[in-house]
Image (spheres, rainbow, N blue to C red):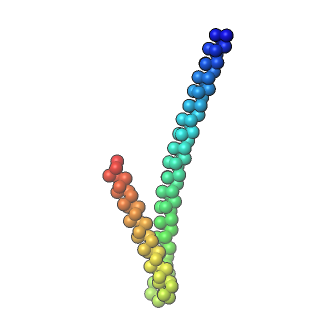
Amino acid sequence: MLFFMGSHFASHATEEAVRRSNALEKNELDTLRKVSRQEYLKKREQKKLEEIRDDIEDEQYLFDGVKLTEAEYHELRYKKEIYELVKKRSEDVEDTNEVLR
């Protein structure tokens, strides 16, 4: 009977060790997923910012010297405002990150 109890405790300890190991691996995977998601979002934000900048440059080039309708003028102005706000926010975040390092 003592052998059985010792074996039972060893088996229980092994199961507990496996559960802890799995929990650590899951936690590491969750952390890796979060980091990967953050990196993806940074790259996507940069890409979208470049797209807006390119749209603005294209419209300015294509419509240089052409009188825009009020709607076109407001749309271009809106894009410029969005671009400047996002660009400033990105720069502020970068500055904050450098201070924290």
Residue 94, position as x, y percentages in the image: 38, 57
Residue 19, position as x, y percentages in the image: 59, 31
- Position of 30 relative to 72 (above/below): above
Query: Would residue 61 be visible to someone looking at this image?
Result: no
> Relative to residue 16, is residue 42 drawn left or right?
left
Measuring 44% from the left and 70% from the top, which residue is drawn there?
83
Residue 97, position as x, y percentages in the image: 37, 53
Residue 98, position as x, y percentages in the image: 34, 52
Measuring 46% from the left and 77% from the top, which residue is drawn there?
78
Q: Residue furthest left?
A: 99
> Relative to residue 18, is residue 92 drawn left or right?
left
- Position of 31 relative to 79 (above/below): above
Q: Nearer the viewer, residue 68 or 5?
A: 5
Measuring 44% from the left and 87% from the top, which residue is drawn there?
65
Q: Nearer the viewer, residue 23 or 81?
A: 23
Query: Would residue 82 be visible to someone looking at this image?
Result: yes
Q: Residue furthest top?
A: 2
* Tally of numbered tags: 0
Measuring 49% from the left and 76% from the top, which residue is drawn there?
58
Which quadrant does the N terminus fall into? top right
| Residue 20: quadrant of the picture | top right
